[in-house]
DNA sequence: ACAAATTCGAGAGCAGTGCTCTTGACAAGC
DNA sequence: GCTTGTCAAGAGCACTGCTCTCGAATTTGT
């Protein structure tokens, strides 16, 4: 992230950004599957081979977009996490997830859909990916959610990673937040991927109902 | 489905099946993204253009695989729906979903991951796709789950489709089953797509915990 | 039973893809 | 100034989905 001292560095960062922007534009209209290095290069008025100076492969470009998407979603949710009561904050955060997903369907599909190639999420992505669950944990902490009975094995798993998490909540609360987290994204994915078509679609009412039930089950009043 | 009267019809059905089998094989090892018409043809010892006599496009082949996958999953869940109590049946059905998904990751990704192309779920798929939620509804019906308070708008949506569903349950129970349904697949997707890596992975304990909480919330005793 | 109609596999070919390698021009550092 | 590293460009490889045409085989109509 060091500012480009030389003209060359400056141009390089600038072009890297432009490539990602153009790629994101094509992603938004055509989906990740259709994203073509050659098409991006064409739109930028350069030749495809030149792109390889900036991204070693198509997958690396996609990985860069994945990280950006995680960060954009994370930022949107962090900003929507406000309100006078934990319940309001919960609703705000959950709604932000859905709204960001609806506004950036292909980017959402890129990060929460099927892992595209031979996949394997690079470790770089987890720091960004974890921002949403951390917001949810923060709300549970503010709500003072207490511990609850969970299987010993599960308690062991969650205790083992507690140190790596910047929010401290009882392990039982942790488990319930993780539960709600998977439910939240399950719902959004179902809506976006058309699985709800013919039942709870449009899903506004269903989503609102579900968010309240989730808060209830986590123990947020 | 009419049995092949002539030798040609017989050969046609046979070859159609062989193509799907080989495609499924490649799907299982390389993923939907990598599935190549030409590679399938090559494995079958024929030329790629000949394949187009059986499937008009790559997408149509994928659609056929999608329907088969929905049916395979539906059949597995239907068969696992047994036990003396509704709670046992519930656990059996949910576990079957996860186990089928783990055993057929790429097929699962094909149907519950991001819609591959410009998408559009053909109407043919819904009859097969709906088998799992119908099993869940059946268990709720057998458990005698009663009605509960849900938003009027949601009640209207669910009432409107009640006739198309071969199981009758109170609308409040219907809503809670749909909720659990999205949660179930949200969890399985998270596990399969690597979102749980670093937290509840391996997810056996988490899954068991979640299934019990879901049964609880649906009202299955 | 024979001719007409249909169906089939094969091959060539088009437009597109990701990616590699080489070439010649430009800027950065000594 | 001269060397060194970086860059865009171009040609090219192996691959993709898909179309079209062509004989051969088979089914169908008479």
Image (tube, coloured by chain):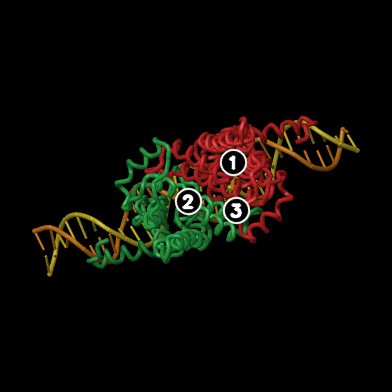
Chain colours: A red, B green, C yellow, D orange
Nearest to the eye among marks 1 and 3: give it.
Answer: 1
Instruction: State whether residue A90 is above or below residue B31.
Output: above
C-alpha separation, residue under disc 1 versus residue under disc 2: 30 Å
Do discs 1 and 3 belong to a common subunit? no
Q: Which residue is drawn at 69% across and 31% down?
A: A14
Nearest to the eye among marks 1 and 2: give it.
Answer: 1
Instruction: State whether residue B60 is above or below residue A205.
Output: below
C-alpha separation, residue under disc 1 versus residue under disc 3: 28 Å
Instruction: State whether residue B191 is above or below residue A23.
Output: below
Q: Which of marks 3 and 2 is nearer the N terminus?
A: 2
> On the rendered image, what quadrant is the N terminus of chain B found in?
bottom left
Q: Which residue is drawn at 61% across and 52% down?
A: B196
Percent across and percent down for residue B62 are 42, 53
Percent across and percent down for residue A18 are 64, 32
Task: Residue under label 3, please give it.
Answer: B194
* Label 2 environment density (alpha carbons within 10 Å; few <14, some 14–19, many ≥20): many
Task: Residue under label 2, please give it.
Answer: B112
Q: Quadrant of residue D9?
A: top right
Q: Residue at x 58, y 39 (%)?
A: A221
Mark 3: which secondary structure?
loop
Is residue A23 visible in the rendered image? The answer is no
Q: Do the residues labelled 1 and 3 touch (CB within 8 Å)?
A: no
Task: Residue under label 1, please give it.
Answer: A220
Task: Indicate the chain on which mark 2 is placed.
Answer: B
Do discs 1 and 2 belong to a common subunit? no
Q: Which residue is drawn at 60% across and 49% down?
A: A178
Q: In this view, does D23 lie to the left or right of A176?
A: left
C-alpha separation, residue under disc 3 versus residue under disc 2: 14 Å
């Amino acid at each position: 992230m060091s500012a480009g001292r030389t003209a060359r560095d400056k141009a390089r960062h600038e072009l890297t950004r432009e490539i990602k922007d153009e790629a994101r534009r094509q992603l938004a209209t055509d989906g990740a599957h259709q994203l073509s290095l050659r098409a991006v290069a064409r739109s930028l008025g350069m030749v495809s081979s030149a792109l390889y100076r900036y991204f070693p492969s198509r997958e690396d470009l996609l990985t860069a977009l994945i990280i950006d998407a995680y960060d954009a979603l994370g930022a949107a949710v962090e900003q929507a996490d406000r309100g006078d009561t934990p319940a309001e904050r919960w609703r705000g955060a959950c709604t932000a997830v859905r709204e960001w997903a609806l506004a950036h369907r292909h980017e959402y599909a890129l990060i929460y859909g099927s892992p595209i190639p031979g996949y394997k999420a690079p470790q770089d992505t987890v720091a960004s990916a974890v921002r949403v669950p951390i917001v949810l944990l923060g709300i549970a902490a503010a709500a003072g959610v207490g511990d609850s009975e969970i299987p010993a094995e599960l308690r062991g798993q969650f205790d083992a990673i507690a140190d790596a998490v910047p929010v401290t909540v009882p392990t039982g609360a942790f488990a319930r937040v993780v539960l709600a987290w998977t439910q939240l994204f399950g719902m959004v994915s179902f809506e976006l991927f058309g699985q709800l078509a013919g039942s709870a679609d449009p899903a506004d009412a269903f989503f609102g109902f579900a968010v309240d039930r989730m808060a209830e089950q986590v123990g947020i009043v």
